Image (cartoon, rainbow, N blue to C red):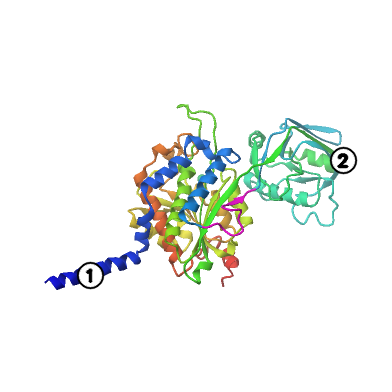
Amino acid sequence: MKRKSIHLLILGVLFSFVACAQKTDLEKTQATVNQQTIKDHIYYIASDEMRGRNTGSPEILKAAEYLAGQLESYGAKQVPGADGWFQPVPLRMKTLATSASLSFGGKDFAMNTDFLIVDGESGDFDGQVVYLEYGLAGEYEGKDIEGKIVFAKAGDGETSDRRGILTLSRDKRVLAKEAGAKALVEFYSSPSTTWASLTRAFNRVGISLDESGDTGAIMPHLWLKDLDNANQRFMMTKSIKQANISIEGMTNALTGDKNVLAMVEGTDPELKDEFIMFSAHYDHIGVGAPNAEGDSIYNGTRDNAIGTVTVLSAAENIAKYPLKRSALFVLYTAEEKGLLGSRYMANNPIIPNEEIVFCWNSDNGGYNDTTISTIIGLERTTAAQHIKDANVAFGLTAIDDPAGEQGLFDRSDNVNFARKGIPAPTYSLGFRAFDAEIGKYYHQQADNPDNVDYDYLEKFFKSYVYASRLIGNDSVTPFWVEGDKYYETGKKLYGRE
Ligand SMILES: [Zn+2]
Protein backbone atom coordinates (compact mmCIF):
# COMPACT_ATOMS: atom_id res chain seq x y z
CA MET A 1 0.00 0.00 0.00
CA LYS A 2 2.68 2.39 1.09
CA ARG A 3 4.94 1.41 -1.80
CA LYS A 4 2.15 1.91 -4.22
CA SER A 5 1.41 5.44 -2.99
CA ILE A 6 5.10 6.38 -3.24
CA HIS A 7 5.05 5.11 -6.78
CA LEU A 8 2.00 7.17 -7.44
CA LEU A 9 3.64 10.20 -5.91
CA ILE A 10 6.75 9.82 -8.05
CA LEU A 11 4.59 9.31 -11.08
CA GLY A 12 2.63 12.42 -10.20
CA VAL A 13 5.76 14.52 -9.76
CA LEU A 14 7.14 13.22 -13.04
CA PHE A 15 3.90 13.96 -14.75
CA SER A 16 3.69 17.53 -13.57
CA PHE A 17 7.37 18.02 -14.43
CA VAL A 18 6.73 16.89 -17.99
CA ALA A 19 3.56 19.00 -18.18
CA CYS A 20 5.51 22.01 -16.97
CA ALA A 21 8.36 21.51 -19.40
CA GLN A 22 5.93 21.07 -22.24
CA LYS A 23 3.33 23.71 -21.64
CA THR A 24 0.86 24.02 -24.47
CA ASP A 25 0.52 27.28 -26.37
CA LEU A 26 -2.72 27.86 -24.50
CA GLU A 27 -0.99 27.43 -21.12
CA LYS A 28 1.87 29.68 -22.20
CA THR A 29 -0.65 32.34 -23.17
CA GLN A 30 -2.37 32.12 -19.80
CA ALA A 31 0.97 32.22 -18.00
CA THR A 32 1.84 35.77 -19.09
CA VAL A 33 -1.29 37.72 -20.06
CA ASN A 34 -2.58 39.43 -16.96
CA GLN A 35 -5.44 41.89 -16.57
CA GLN A 36 -3.69 44.23 -14.12
CA THR A 37 -0.62 44.53 -16.36
CA ILE A 38 -2.79 45.33 -19.37
CA LYS A 39 -4.66 47.93 -17.36
CA ASP A 40 -1.49 49.59 -16.05
CA HIS A 41 -0.04 49.96 -19.55
CA ILE A 42 -3.28 51.35 -20.98
CA TYR A 43 -3.72 53.80 -18.11
CA TYR A 44 -0.23 55.13 -18.67
CA ILE A 45 -0.21 55.28 -22.49
CA ALA A 46 -3.68 56.89 -22.55
CA SER A 47 -3.05 59.16 -19.54
CA ASP A 48 -3.64 62.93 -19.68
CA GLU A 49 0.11 63.28 -19.19
CA MET A 50 0.57 61.85 -22.72
CA ARG A 51 -1.70 64.58 -24.11
CA GLY A 52 -3.10 62.44 -26.89
CA ARG A 53 0.30 61.35 -28.29
CA ASN A 54 0.16 63.66 -31.28
CA THR A 55 2.75 63.19 -34.00
CA GLY A 56 5.43 65.84 -33.59
CA SER A 57 4.70 66.40 -29.88
CA PRO A 58 7.17 65.90 -27.00
CA GLU A 59 4.70 63.45 -25.43
CA ILE A 60 4.83 60.98 -28.28
CA LEU A 61 8.59 60.76 -27.82
CA LYS A 62 7.98 59.98 -24.17
CA ALA A 63 5.56 57.24 -25.20
CA ALA A 64 8.22 55.84 -27.55
CA GLU A 65 10.74 55.67 -24.71
CA TYR A 66 8.20 53.91 -22.51
CA LEU A 67 7.45 51.30 -25.17
CA ALA A 68 11.13 50.67 -25.86
CA GLY A 69 11.73 50.26 -22.11
CA GLN A 70 8.98 47.66 -21.87
CA LEU A 71 10.26 45.68 -24.85
CA GLU A 72 13.74 45.68 -23.36
CA SER A 73 12.46 44.57 -19.96
CA TYR A 74 10.79 41.53 -21.55
CA GLY A 75 14.10 40.42 -23.01
CA ALA A 76 13.23 41.22 -26.64
CA LYS A 77 16.26 42.25 -28.71
CA GLN A 78 17.09 45.26 -30.84
CA VAL A 79 16.72 44.68 -34.57
CA PRO A 80 20.11 44.80 -36.33
CA GLY A 81 20.17 47.82 -38.61
CA ALA A 82 17.75 49.84 -36.48
CA ASP A 83 18.76 52.89 -34.45
CA GLY A 84 18.66 51.09 -31.10
CA TRP A 85 14.99 50.41 -30.39
CA PHE A 86 13.88 52.87 -33.05
CA GLN A 87 13.48 53.64 -36.70
CA PRO A 88 13.53 57.43 -37.09
CA VAL A 89 10.75 58.53 -39.46
CA PRO A 90 11.51 61.70 -41.45
CA LEU A 91 8.29 63.62 -40.89
CA ARG A 92 8.05 67.23 -41.89
CA MET A 93 5.75 69.66 -40.14
CA LYS A 94 4.77 72.59 -42.27
CA THR A 95 3.09 75.80 -41.24
CA LEU A 96 0.68 77.76 -43.42
CA ALA A 97 1.72 80.62 -45.68
CA THR A 98 0.68 84.03 -44.44
CA SER A 99 0.38 85.25 -48.03
CA ALA A 100 1.19 84.07 -51.54
CA SER A 101 0.71 85.03 -55.16
CA LEU A 102 0.69 83.38 -58.57
CA SER A 103 0.69 85.21 -61.87
CA PHE A 104 1.13 84.51 -65.56
CA GLY A 105 0.14 86.25 -68.82
CA GLY A 106 -0.82 89.41 -66.96
CA LYS A 107 -3.30 87.57 -64.73
CA ASP A 108 -2.95 87.58 -60.96
CA PHE A 109 -4.42 84.80 -58.86
CA ALA A 110 -5.23 85.01 -55.16
CA MET A 111 -4.27 82.49 -52.47
CA ASN A 112 -7.20 80.29 -51.33
CA THR A 113 -9.73 82.01 -53.63
CA ASP A 114 -7.96 80.92 -56.81
CA PHE A 115 -5.15 78.60 -55.78
CA LEU A 116 -4.13 76.40 -52.86
CA ILE A 117 -0.64 75.63 -51.64
CA VAL A 118 -0.33 71.85 -51.43
CA ASP A 119 3.31 72.06 -50.42
CA GLY A 120 6.14 74.57 -50.46
CA GLU A 121 8.21 77.06 -48.55
CA SER A 122 8.67 80.81 -48.43
CA GLY A 123 10.42 82.45 -51.37
CA ASP A 124 10.08 83.84 -54.89
CA PHE A 125 9.89 81.24 -57.62
CA ASP A 126 9.93 82.75 -61.08
CA GLY A 127 10.55 80.64 -64.12
CA GLN A 128 9.80 79.58 -67.63
CA VAL A 129 6.61 77.62 -68.14
CA VAL A 130 6.59 73.99 -69.27
CA TYR A 131 3.16 72.59 -70.04
CA LEU A 132 2.68 68.82 -69.62
CA GLU A 133 -0.67 67.09 -69.99
CA TYR A 134 -0.97 65.41 -66.58
CA GLY A 135 2.62 65.47 -65.38
CA LEU A 136 2.75 61.67 -65.15
CA ALA A 137 5.75 59.40 -65.65
CA GLY A 138 6.73 59.29 -69.30
CA GLU A 139 5.64 62.86 -70.03
CA TYR A 140 9.00 64.16 -68.87
CA GLU A 141 11.02 62.23 -71.44
CA GLY A 142 13.11 64.42 -73.71
CA LYS A 143 12.00 67.64 -72.01
CA ASP A 144 14.21 70.20 -70.33
CA ILE A 145 12.53 70.89 -67.00
CA GLU A 146 15.48 72.22 -64.99
CA GLY A 147 14.56 75.44 -63.18
CA LYS A 148 11.16 75.69 -64.88
CA ILE A 149 7.60 75.78 -63.59
CA VAL A 150 5.60 72.73 -64.65
CA PHE A 151 1.88 73.21 -65.38
CA ALA A 152 -0.33 70.15 -65.81
CA LYS A 153 -3.91 69.02 -65.32
CA ALA A 154 -4.78 67.42 -61.98
CA GLY A 155 -5.68 63.70 -62.00
CA ASP A 156 -5.07 61.42 -64.95
CA GLY A 157 -8.25 61.86 -66.98
CA GLU A 158 -9.89 58.83 -65.32
CA THR A 159 -9.55 59.22 -61.57
CA SER A 160 -12.32 61.43 -60.23
CA ASP A 161 -12.31 60.98 -56.45
CA ARG A 162 -10.42 63.35 -54.23
CA ARG A 163 -8.24 60.72 -52.56
CA GLY A 164 -7.19 59.27 -55.92
CA ILE A 165 -6.35 62.70 -57.31
CA LEU A 166 -4.32 63.47 -54.19
CA THR A 167 -2.37 60.24 -54.48
CA LEU A 168 -1.57 61.01 -58.12
CA SER A 169 -0.65 64.52 -57.11
CA ARG A 170 1.89 63.27 -54.59
CA ASP A 171 3.55 61.09 -57.23
CA LYS A 172 3.60 63.99 -59.68
CA ARG A 173 5.35 66.17 -57.14
CA VAL A 174 8.12 63.60 -56.80
CA LEU A 175 8.48 63.34 -60.59
CA ALA A 176 8.60 67.12 -61.06
CA LYS A 177 11.16 67.52 -58.32
CA GLU A 178 13.33 64.73 -59.68
CA ALA A 179 13.21 66.39 -63.12
CA GLY A 180 14.57 69.59 -61.55
CA ALA A 181 11.38 71.67 -61.71
CA LYS A 182 11.22 74.89 -59.73
CA ALA A 183 7.49 74.48 -59.02
CA LEU A 184 4.46 72.41 -60.01
CA VAL A 185 1.02 73.90 -60.68
CA GLU A 186 -1.96 71.63 -61.34
CA PHE A 187 -5.16 72.86 -62.98
CA TYR A 188 -7.83 71.45 -60.69
CA SER A 189 -11.12 70.87 -62.46
CA SER A 190 -12.70 67.90 -60.67
CA PRO A 191 -16.27 68.62 -59.52
CA SER A 192 -16.13 65.77 -56.96
CA THR A 193 -15.01 68.01 -54.09
CA THR A 194 -15.98 71.62 -53.52
CA TRP A 195 -13.23 74.22 -53.53
CA ALA A 196 -14.29 75.35 -50.05
CA SER A 197 -13.73 71.89 -48.61
CA LEU A 198 -10.35 71.61 -50.32
CA THR A 199 -9.39 74.99 -48.85
CA ARG A 200 -10.26 73.69 -45.40
CA ALA A 201 -8.37 70.44 -45.97
CA PHE A 202 -5.17 72.12 -47.12
CA ASN A 203 -5.18 74.96 -44.63
CA ARG A 204 -4.05 72.88 -41.69
CA VAL A 205 -0.65 72.66 -40.16
CA GLY A 206 0.42 69.58 -42.04
CA ILE A 207 2.60 66.59 -41.37
CA SER A 208 4.05 64.81 -44.36
CA LEU A 209 6.60 62.13 -44.99
CA ASP A 210 9.85 63.47 -46.36
CA GLU A 211 11.14 60.51 -48.33
CA SER A 212 13.55 62.53 -50.39
CA GLY A 213 15.74 62.85 -47.31
CA ASP A 214 16.04 66.49 -48.27
CA THR A 215 14.32 69.27 -46.40
CA GLY A 216 16.68 71.92 -47.73
CA ALA A 217 14.50 72.91 -50.66
CA ILE A 218 10.78 72.26 -50.76
CA MET A 219 9.39 72.64 -54.25
CA PRO A 220 6.19 74.71 -54.32
CA HIS A 221 3.20 72.71 -55.48
CA LEU A 222 -0.07 74.53 -56.17
CA TRP A 223 -3.56 73.63 -57.24
CA LEU A 224 -5.14 76.30 -59.41
CA LYS A 225 -8.95 76.33 -59.49
CA ASP A 226 -10.02 75.76 -63.07
CA LEU A 227 -13.46 74.18 -63.10
CA ASP A 228 -14.27 75.42 -66.62
CA ASN A 229 -10.70 74.87 -67.92
CA ALA A 230 -10.50 78.59 -68.80
CA ASN A 231 -7.10 79.14 -67.17
CA GLN A 232 -5.67 76.14 -68.91
CA ARG A 233 -7.01 77.33 -72.30
CA PHE A 234 -5.69 80.81 -71.61
CA MET A 235 -2.20 79.44 -70.96
CA MET A 236 -2.25 77.29 -74.11
CA THR A 237 -3.75 79.75 -76.56
CA LYS A 238 -1.61 82.66 -75.39
CA SER A 239 1.51 80.42 -75.32
CA ILE A 240 2.43 81.78 -71.90
CA LYS A 241 6.20 81.61 -71.40
CA GLN A 242 6.72 82.87 -67.86
CA ALA A 243 5.07 82.46 -64.45
CA ASN A 244 5.75 83.96 -61.04
CA ILE A 245 5.07 82.43 -57.66
CA SER A 246 5.73 84.08 -54.32
CA ILE A 247 5.13 82.55 -50.88
CA GLU A 248 5.55 84.20 -47.49
CA GLY A 249 5.52 82.92 -43.91
CA MET A 250 5.64 79.19 -44.67
CA THR A 251 8.05 77.09 -42.60
CA ASN A 252 9.05 73.43 -42.58
CA ALA A 253 10.75 71.47 -39.80
CA LEU A 254 11.53 67.82 -39.20
CA THR A 255 9.90 66.23 -36.13
CA GLY A 256 11.73 63.68 -33.97
CA ASP A 257 9.13 60.95 -34.53
CA LYS A 258 10.06 57.31 -34.68
CA ASN A 259 8.72 53.80 -35.01
CA VAL A 260 9.60 51.53 -32.09
CA LEU A 261 10.79 48.02 -32.86
CA ALA A 262 12.23 44.86 -31.32
CA MET A 263 12.53 41.19 -32.16
CA VAL A 264 12.70 37.69 -30.71
CA GLU A 265 14.50 35.08 -32.76
CA GLY A 266 12.63 31.88 -33.61
CA THR A 267 13.63 28.48 -32.22
CA ASP A 268 13.22 26.35 -35.35
CA PRO A 269 16.37 26.22 -37.50
CA GLU A 270 14.30 26.55 -40.70
CA LEU A 271 11.23 28.52 -39.67
CA LYS A 272 13.21 31.19 -37.84
CA ASP A 273 14.04 32.74 -41.22
CA GLU A 274 10.37 33.72 -41.44
CA PHE A 275 9.15 36.65 -39.37
CA ILE A 276 5.70 37.25 -37.98
CA MET A 277 5.26 40.98 -37.53
CA PHE A 278 3.15 42.23 -34.62
CA SER A 279 2.20 45.83 -35.16
CA ALA A 280 0.07 48.73 -33.94
CA HIS A 281 0.20 52.50 -34.11
CA TYR A 282 0.79 54.31 -30.84
CA ASP A 283 0.12 57.87 -31.97
CA HIS A 284 -3.23 59.61 -31.63
CA ILE A 285 -4.59 63.08 -32.41
CA GLY A 286 -3.44 65.20 -29.46
CA VAL A 287 -5.37 68.00 -27.81
CA GLY A 288 -8.27 70.03 -29.23
CA ALA A 289 -11.13 72.22 -28.10
CA PRO A 290 -12.84 71.07 -24.86
CA ASN A 291 -16.08 69.06 -25.07
CA ALA A 292 -19.16 69.71 -22.90
CA GLU A 293 -17.40 68.08 -19.94
CA GLY A 294 -14.39 70.37 -20.34
CA ASP A 295 -12.16 67.55 -21.59
CA SER A 296 -9.78 68.67 -24.33
CA ILE A 297 -7.42 65.70 -24.44
CA TYR A 298 -7.98 63.00 -27.02
CA ASN A 299 -6.54 60.18 -24.92
CA GLY A 300 -6.90 57.54 -27.60
CA THR A 301 -7.54 54.59 -25.30
CA ARG A 302 -9.35 52.38 -27.80
CA ASP A 303 -7.51 54.05 -30.68
CA ASN A 304 -4.90 52.86 -30.12
CA ALA A 305 -3.45 52.41 -26.64
CA ILE A 306 -5.26 49.06 -26.65
CA GLY A 307 -3.67 47.94 -29.92
CA THR A 308 -0.27 49.10 -28.70
CA VAL A 309 -0.64 47.06 -25.54
CA THR A 310 -1.75 43.93 -27.43
CA VAL A 311 1.63 44.09 -29.17
CA LEU A 312 3.39 44.57 -25.82
CA SER A 313 1.51 41.54 -24.48
CA ALA A 314 2.60 39.45 -27.45
CA ALA A 315 6.20 40.63 -26.97
CA GLU A 316 6.20 39.78 -23.26
CA ASN A 317 4.78 36.34 -24.00
CA ILE A 318 7.01 35.52 -26.97
CA ALA A 319 10.18 36.79 -25.29
CA LYS A 320 9.45 34.32 -22.49
CA TYR A 321 8.30 31.49 -24.75
CA PRO A 322 9.81 32.05 -28.22
CA LEU A 323 7.95 30.79 -31.26
CA LYS A 324 9.36 28.56 -33.99
CA ARG A 325 9.22 31.59 -36.31
CA SER A 326 10.99 34.83 -35.49
CA ALA A 327 8.89 37.68 -34.16
CA LEU A 328 9.17 41.35 -35.09
CA PHE A 329 7.34 43.90 -32.92
CA VAL A 330 6.67 47.31 -34.43
CA LEU A 331 4.83 50.31 -33.00
CA TYR A 332 4.18 53.06 -35.54
CA THR A 333 3.96 56.79 -35.29
CA ALA A 334 1.80 59.04 -37.51
CA GLU A 335 -0.96 56.59 -38.41
CA GLU A 336 -3.48 59.34 -37.75
CA LYS A 337 -1.66 61.61 -40.22
CA GLY A 338 -2.18 59.18 -43.08
CA LEU A 339 -0.51 55.86 -42.14
CA LEU A 340 2.88 57.55 -42.46
CA GLY A 341 5.02 55.60 -39.97
CA SER A 342 4.00 52.28 -41.49
CA ARG A 343 4.36 53.59 -45.04
CA TYR A 344 7.90 54.61 -44.24
CA MET A 345 8.69 51.21 -42.77
CA ALA A 346 7.10 49.30 -45.68
CA ASN A 347 9.19 51.36 -48.12
CA ASN A 348 12.34 51.35 -45.99
CA PRO A 349 12.23 47.95 -44.31
CA ILE A 350 14.86 46.93 -41.76
CA ILE A 351 13.85 43.26 -41.95
CA PRO A 352 13.28 42.71 -45.72
CA ASN A 353 9.57 42.53 -46.58
CA GLU A 354 9.96 39.10 -48.20
CA GLU A 355 11.13 37.69 -44.84
CA ILE A 356 7.96 38.91 -43.13
CA VAL A 357 5.36 36.23 -43.82
CA PHE A 358 2.49 37.69 -41.80
CA CYS A 359 1.57 41.08 -40.40
CA TRP A 360 -0.68 40.73 -37.34
CA ASN A 361 -1.78 44.31 -36.94
CA SER A 362 -3.88 45.63 -34.08
CA ASP A 363 -5.96 48.80 -34.40
CA ASN A 364 -9.19 49.91 -32.80
CA GLY A 365 -12.03 52.37 -33.14
CA GLY A 366 -14.18 51.00 -30.32
CA TYR A 367 -16.54 48.13 -29.51
CA ASN A 368 -20.22 47.41 -29.16
CA ASP A 369 -20.19 43.65 -28.56
CA THR A 370 -18.07 42.02 -25.85
CA THR A 371 -18.75 38.47 -27.06
CA ILE A 372 -16.69 38.87 -30.22
CA SER A 373 -13.50 40.22 -31.68
CA THR A 374 -13.61 41.75 -35.15
CA ILE A 375 -10.82 40.94 -37.55
CA ILE A 376 -10.59 43.15 -40.61
CA GLY A 377 -9.61 40.71 -43.33
CA LEU A 378 -10.20 37.57 -41.23
CA GLU A 379 -11.21 35.36 -44.15
CA ARG A 380 -8.61 36.79 -46.50
CA THR A 381 -5.69 34.76 -45.14
CA THR A 382 -5.14 31.10 -44.35
CA ALA A 383 -4.52 32.01 -40.68
CA ALA A 384 -8.29 32.47 -40.20
CA GLN A 385 -8.81 29.12 -38.44
CA HIS A 386 -6.08 29.80 -35.86
CA ILE A 387 -7.60 33.18 -35.12
CA LYS A 388 -11.08 31.68 -34.72
CA ASP A 389 -9.80 28.86 -32.50
CA ALA A 390 -7.88 31.30 -30.31
CA ASN A 391 -11.02 33.34 -29.77
CA VAL A 392 -13.15 30.31 -28.94
CA ALA A 393 -10.56 29.28 -26.34
CA PHE A 394 -11.34 32.46 -24.40
CA GLY A 395 -15.08 32.49 -24.91
CA LEU A 396 -15.12 34.90 -27.86
CA THR A 397 -16.16 34.52 -31.48
CA ALA A 398 -13.98 35.98 -34.23
CA ILE A 399 -15.97 37.74 -36.95
CA ASP A 400 -14.82 39.41 -40.17
CA ASP A 401 -15.25 43.10 -41.04
CA PRO A 402 -18.99 43.88 -40.71
CA ALA A 403 -18.64 47.46 -42.03
CA GLY A 404 -17.31 46.97 -45.54
CA GLU A 405 -18.57 50.43 -46.48
CA GLN A 406 -16.00 51.96 -44.10
CA GLY A 407 -13.11 50.51 -46.10
CA LEU A 408 -11.33 49.72 -42.83
CA PHE A 409 -8.83 47.29 -44.36
CA ASP A 410 -7.42 50.17 -46.40
CA ARG A 411 -7.50 52.67 -43.54
CA SER A 412 -4.98 51.20 -41.14
CA ASP A 413 -1.26 50.45 -41.18
CA ASN A 414 -1.79 46.87 -42.37
CA VAL A 415 -2.59 48.06 -45.90
CA ASN A 416 0.93 49.38 -46.46
CA PHE A 417 2.21 45.83 -46.00
CA ALA A 418 -0.70 44.17 -47.84
CA ARG A 419 0.23 46.28 -50.87
CA LYS A 420 3.71 44.76 -50.71
CA GLY A 421 2.10 41.29 -50.71
CA ILE A 422 2.33 40.47 -46.99
CA PRO A 423 -0.84 38.84 -45.57
CA ALA A 424 -1.98 41.51 -43.11
CA PRO A 425 -5.28 41.37 -41.23
CA THR A 426 -6.11 43.80 -38.42
CA TYR A 427 -7.30 42.61 -35.03
CA SER A 428 -9.95 44.88 -33.49
CA LEU A 429 -12.28 45.10 -30.52
CA GLY A 430 -15.67 43.54 -31.20
CA PHE A 431 -18.05 45.60 -33.27
CA ARG A 432 -20.95 44.55 -35.47
CA ALA A 433 -21.54 47.95 -37.06
CA PHE A 434 -19.85 51.35 -37.08
CA ASP A 435 -22.76 52.78 -35.07
CA ALA A 436 -23.48 55.53 -32.52
CA GLU A 437 -21.96 53.49 -29.69
CA ILE A 438 -18.64 53.49 -31.57
CA GLY A 439 -19.10 57.15 -32.48
CA LYS A 440 -19.35 58.10 -28.79
CA TYR A 441 -15.64 57.40 -28.37
CA TYR A 442 -14.11 57.15 -31.86
CA HIS A 443 -11.76 60.15 -32.22
CA GLN A 444 -13.49 61.83 -29.25
CA GLN A 445 -12.17 63.37 -26.03
CA ALA A 446 -14.21 60.72 -24.18
CA ASP A 447 -11.96 57.86 -25.37
CA ASN A 448 -10.60 57.51 -21.82
CA PRO A 449 -9.03 54.54 -20.02
CA ASP A 450 -11.69 54.51 -17.27
CA ASN A 451 -14.60 53.59 -19.53
CA VAL A 452 -13.45 50.30 -21.04
CA ASP A 453 -14.37 46.81 -19.88
CA TYR A 454 -11.14 45.19 -18.62
CA ASP A 455 -12.72 41.74 -18.14
CA TYR A 456 -13.48 41.78 -21.83
CA LEU A 457 -10.02 43.14 -22.67
CA GLU A 458 -8.37 40.27 -20.83
CA LYS A 459 -10.14 37.76 -23.10
CA PHE A 460 -9.46 39.90 -26.16
CA PHE A 461 -5.74 40.13 -25.35
CA LYS A 462 -5.40 36.43 -24.61
CA SER A 463 -7.05 35.59 -27.92
CA TYR A 464 -4.58 37.84 -29.77
CA VAL A 465 -1.57 36.31 -28.06
CA TYR A 466 -2.85 32.73 -28.42
CA ALA A 467 -3.54 33.29 -32.13
CA SER A 468 -0.01 34.72 -32.43
CA ARG A 469 1.40 31.52 -30.96
CA LEU A 470 -0.65 29.24 -33.19
CA ILE A 471 0.36 31.16 -36.33
CA GLY A 472 4.01 31.46 -35.32
CA ASN A 473 4.36 27.76 -34.51
CA ASP A 474 2.39 26.29 -37.42
CA SER A 475 4.57 24.31 -39.82
CA VAL A 476 2.49 25.76 -42.66
CA THR A 477 3.31 29.38 -43.57
CA PRO A 478 0.22 31.62 -43.63
CA PHE A 479 -0.72 33.17 -46.96
CA TRP A 480 -3.46 35.03 -48.79
CA VAL A 481 -6.55 33.05 -49.72
CA GLU A 482 -6.49 32.25 -53.43
CA GLY A 483 -8.18 34.93 -55.50
CA ASP A 484 -7.56 37.72 -52.99
CA LYS A 485 -6.71 41.15 -54.37
CA TYR A 486 -3.14 40.75 -53.03
CA TYR A 487 -2.66 37.04 -53.78
CA GLU A 488 -0.56 37.55 -56.93
CA THR A 489 1.51 40.33 -55.35
CA GLY A 490 2.19 37.97 -52.45
CA LYS A 491 3.28 35.17 -54.77
CA LYS A 492 5.76 37.53 -56.40
CA LEU A 493 7.07 38.86 -53.09
CA TYR A 494 7.86 35.42 -51.73
CA GLY A 495 8.78 33.81 -55.06
CA ARG A 496 5.97 31.25 -54.59
CA GLU A 497 4.94 29.20 -57.58
ZN1 LIG B 1 -6.15 53.65 -35.04
Q: Which of the 4 image quarters holds residue 139?
A: bottom right
Q: Earlier in the sequence, mark 2 or mark 1?
A: 1
Quadrant of the rendered structure where residue 207 is?
A: top right
* Total count of labels: 2
Q: Position of residue 110 (x, y in %)?
A: 76, 31
Identify the mark at residue 271; answer none if there is no mark: none
SS category of the residue bearing label 2? strand
Relative to 328, 186 lies left or right: right
- Side (left or right) of 295 relative to 238: left
Q: Looking at the figure, which quarter contains the N terminus?
A: bottom left
Q: Secondary structure at mark 1?
A: helix
Residue at the image position 40 percent from the left and 48 percent from the top: 430
Please state the extent of the stretch shown in magenta in the rendering. 77-89
Q: What is the number of the mark on residue 242? A: 2
Q: Is residue 272 magenta?
A: no
Residue 266 in the image: x percent, y percent? 48, 65
Give the label, 2 or 1, closer to the camera: 1
Q: Is residue 402 visible?
A: no
Q: Is residue 487 above or below residue 337?
A: below
Q: Nearer the viewer, residue 233 or 318?
A: 318
Near mark 1 (Cα within 10 A), the count class, few <14, some 14-19 or many ≥20, is few
The correct choice, above or below, for 75 with respect to 154 in the image is below
Q: Looking at numbered disc 2 in the image, what kind of residue is underneath it? A: Gln
Q: Position of residue 309 (x, y in %)?
A: 45, 48
- Magenta includes 82? yes
Residue shown at 38% from the left, 54% from the top: 32
199 or 57, which is in the foreground?
Answer: 57
Q: CA distance from mark 2 to mark 1?
A: 94 Å
Question: Which residue is the site of mark 1?
Answer: 10
Three-letter amino acid code of the residue under disc 1: Ile
The secondary structure that dominates the magenta segment is loop
